Image (cartoon, coloured by chain):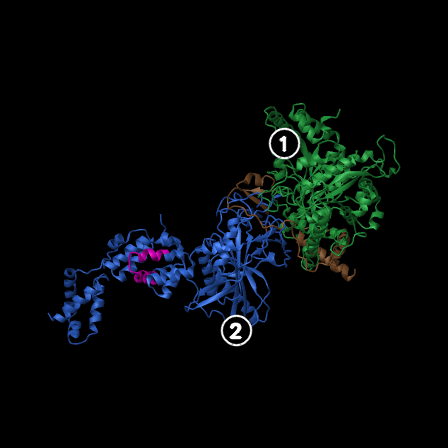
Amino acid sequence: MTHPCDLSLVEMSERLACGDLCPVALTEEALRRAEENKHLNAFVTLNKEGALEQAEQSRKLIKEGKMRALEGIPLAYKDMFCTKGLRTTAGSRMLENFVPPYSAHVVKLLEGEGAICIGKCNQDEFAMGSASITGFGGAVVNPLSDQAGKDQTGKDQAGKDKAGKQLSAGGSSGGSAAAVAAGIVPAALGTDTGGSVRQPAAFTGCVGVKPTYGRCSRFGIVAYASSLDQAGVFARSVQDAFAVLHHMMGYDERDMTSVDSYRGEKVNPDMNFGILLPSLDVVEKYPAISEWLKGMEMLLGKKSVEKNMIAGERYKTKDVNLQNLESGALEAYYIIATAEASSNLARYDGVRYTHRSTHRSTALKENNIDELISGSRSEGFGSEVRRRILMGTHVLSSGYYDAIYVQAQKMRRILKGIFEKMFETYDIILSPVTPTTAFTLEEAKNFSPQAMYLQDFFTVQASLAGLPCLSMPFVKDANGLPIGLQLIAPAFQEERLLAAASHVEKIIGYKP
Amino acid sequence: MSEDEISQKEQLARLARLARLRVGTGDSADFAAMAAWFEKIKTIDTQGIEPMTNPREENARLREDRVDDGDVRDALLANAPETQHGFFVVPKVIE
Amino acid sequence: MTSSLSSSLSSSSPSSPAASMLPDGWEMVVGLEVHAQITSSSKLFSGAATAFDAEPNRQVSFIDAAMPGMLPSLNKRCVEKALLTAIALEGEVNRHSVFERKNYFYPDLPQGYQISQLKHPLMQGGEIAIALEDGSTKKIAIERMHMEQDAGKSLHDMILGKTAIDLNRSGVALMEIVSKPELASPQEASAYVAKLRSILRAIDTCDGNMQEGSLRVDANVSVRKKDDPKLGTRCEIKNLNSLRFLRQAVLFEAKRQITLLEQREPVLQQTRLFDTATGTTRNMRSKEEAHDYRYFPDPDIPPLVIEEEQLEGLRAALPELPDARCARLQRDYGISASESSLLGENATSAAYFSTLAASVPAKTAANWMTSELFARLKTHEVEIDTIASILPAERAVKMLLLVEKGTISARAAKTLLDRMLENDKEPAALVEEMGLQQMGDEKTLLPLLQALLDENPKQRDAYRGGKQAVFGWFVGQAMQRTRGRGDPKVVNALLQRLLDNEG
């Protein structure tokens, strides 16, 4: 018998509706599991009292027949989502004690449907990272860590190099992914700027969805890169993920970049899949990609794969310059993201609500106020954040603005054009999510900044173009670790994405 | 140090000042590596392409002129490190 | 309740005399950046209120305080008013306009950047016509106008050793109007601002209240030898909040630069502050380092696209502009061009004039306002806008009617006016109190004049002997005896009669 907490969200909801399941018991269980899985370090703040209050409220409403769409469903939110009255840190010392007097728009929408907030999830500081190791609360541990090197029966598999080691849950929304993968909550919110929902989903064996840019209001979400950030959902199935996402989308007049809900077309059941694969030398470099390709051939048949391959080497037309999808996209992403971040993080200055430096030097080289600001920022931000702010300042500075930043923005438009071209032929684009499976925390700590950035190799393109996409568990590597499959749809075609992903999910039949 | 290294160091110091951050000894090498990496974007042929600031390029939707916000001083000051008489307080700023 | 003129008096000396204030052979070049707060209920990007003088931090939303996750939302009315201003200034509206971030750190700049416009401002070009002292018109070209956020306020002297920050003003909508460097004197600078202010008020896009800070001026001043085509190094004087300070600051700065250059020292490009107490400008320390503002298009704000329909609608709804108002007064009331220019420049004075002209002849009203009233306001450095609280139109009408009816003489009216500007009393009451009634009654005058003649036989005989000029002396004496209250017509007639009578 499946424990209620391990049911799909949809089933959970049905059981709650008919009275088989009590929301308070469900929330209590979620909180208990959170405690039990403390070693994963998935949470920054647990919302014990608040969650139980909300659950009690849900219980009343269900009894009164006033059940809302997500009534009593326990969720967790990445600590980038402001939650009124509940500490929100963005994984940073800068906001270590910040209690927002407001909630993010999407949080309000979900709570308006009766969802329960179990707690705030750990992450990379200010969403900058791909391993969830830079949060001030420490690294998130992938729940699959103790499974590595073992197959279903518990017998050790070949390739035990990751056995017994702590694995990264990916980043920057590692905590949210871990909370779902560990069965603490059926769904959790993350933010995806360059892959920060898709990559942790791939590492932890979950589904991770990022909608079209503008579908979900960013109001109340700590901003990292304004033109790239989007709220995303982790869940254990495609249906569950979209069940939550459905209630988060919609125009918010407080976010000028948000758009109205329904602009999708009718879904064509006979879909054409295009397969996006990098050049052969990249494929050969990464074993996980080879596995992925094998998986593709098993899924669609070798002939079909060959026919629909949009690969750098094998598909060359003068209109579609695939080169740019590999080189150029990653640089463009980091140039734009760091530029926007350098400006978005300027508000954290020690004046109104952040950490404030108390150290005062006796030799005043700086003006008092500058000392306060520099001191607060240098103390409050970790090294990765400081690095990205400096790089962003660099690309916007005079002498570099046109050559680097504007150039990156042009690259962005080129990418958008490439996708539009591809979607003339294909309904859905398939690609790998990450070059590798979950690396160990030890490896992560020793990555050079650029090695870490390479994790985003497959995910930045859809972010730059603002397209809806998701990662779903696909096949496994020699260590038994999940390899993800990315689906990308045209702008505003979430319905199509849902249909395609559900279809593929059925065929794959992935077992965690 | 080479001329390049010196100018990199100066650029980094300038950036640190602009960003109100203090740079450590390790930051120089990191900066140089990333700056070099970013230079690669120059190799992309972008002739005739307009820059794209945001995927949403549709016309801005405007808000009605209405007072429906503000007057939340207590909440506003609640997280402040230092306040007095309803003001945010910082060390004296010399003009 | 009205206030008297004395309470509106400012303590300093009258404005500086015109022209030729600089050493020989030098001229000044002035360009002005005017920041005008748009009259709207809420701020440019948030729904917080914009009213003046609220308690600190009461008109601040979480957006204005730049809290995590907050986003800007553009105010429709602010855009409309800025567009209306662009039309009134005859500029070219940029139909595709972009907001950019100007990045720098300052405690009263919560976001760490100001949302402004750089490459695609709302308006480009435009011009303002100013009246020079010789009566001619000079057209001053405008470079551009854009929209931007105002910053909060830093109070440095409130708490010892600390700076207190009030964000009420943070995020209020501003129009920044930049002129080309075509102003050649403090008076031209002042006239430009006054004209701009009257236009903005006429179309209700800014209340132009400089004391409250709704209109602030930054002046860019440089000097050069006459006939030198090149521009000298300029200095920017920030935040001038009165026309008088503007004139003083510009003049001081020009002289300061000339002194440096005459001593063969260079003028350094600086940002300076005007010290109102000493009347001097000084360098602003915080602006010494060159700023790299790293402008880039704000990714939170889609482009602002202006449709032709909207512009047409605004053009059709444009209120009467000052120049048009002046022309109308001249046409409808038959007054002179110079009178209409003085009366029509300001909506308040135009309305005041119209009220007077409804009860007394237009020529009388115009003449009285431009020579008597305006002169006194100028002497006391009070602006016409406050006239309703000093001398309401209805009371002025009553006074003018007393002159029309002959109750008081024109001369007495001047004395009466001075007194009326100092208190609230009705003119009729004051006339009684001050004994200003004209004497026009023959019965009273005749014996008085007869006595005058009898007491001065020498002059009487001189006149009768043919010395016509002595008549004037008698008139003067008669006026003295009546303490200026004699009705000149009657006095003249009676004197004539008595003197000619020989008896």
Residue at 72 percent of width and 28 percent of height: A5
What amino acid type should be assigned to the residue bearing mark 2?
Lys
- Does residue C162 appear to the left or right of C330 in the view shown? right
From this viewpoint, is residue C61 visible?
A: yes
Q: Position of residue C328 (x, y in %)?
A: 37, 61
- Does residue A66 appear to the left or right of A417 in the view shown? left
Among the chains pictured, the one given blue colouring is C
Q: Position of residue A361 (x, y in %)?
A: 67, 49
Which of the pair A91/B56 is nearer the observer?
Answer: B56
The residue beneath circle 1 is: A69
Magenta run includes residue A469: no
The residue beneath circle 2 is: C226
Q: Chain of mark 2?
A: C
Among the chains pictured, the one given green colouring is A
What residue range appears in magenta? Answer: C351-371
In whole angstroms, how far apart are the C-alphas of marks 2 and 1? Answer: 79 Å
Q: Crowdedness of circle 1 by 10 Å Cα count: few (<14), some, many (20+)?
A: some
Q: Position of residue C354 (x, y in %)?
A: 34, 57
Residue at 61 percent of width and 23 percent of height: A63
Mark 2 or 1, closer to the camera: 1
From this viewpoint, is residue A365 visible?
A: no
Q: Chain of mark 1?
A: A
Q: Colour of chain B?
A: brown
Above or below, A211 relative to C34? above
Which of the pair C294/A470 is nearer the observer?
Answer: A470
Q: Crowdedness of circle 2 by 10 Å Cα count: few (<14), some, many (20+)?
A: few
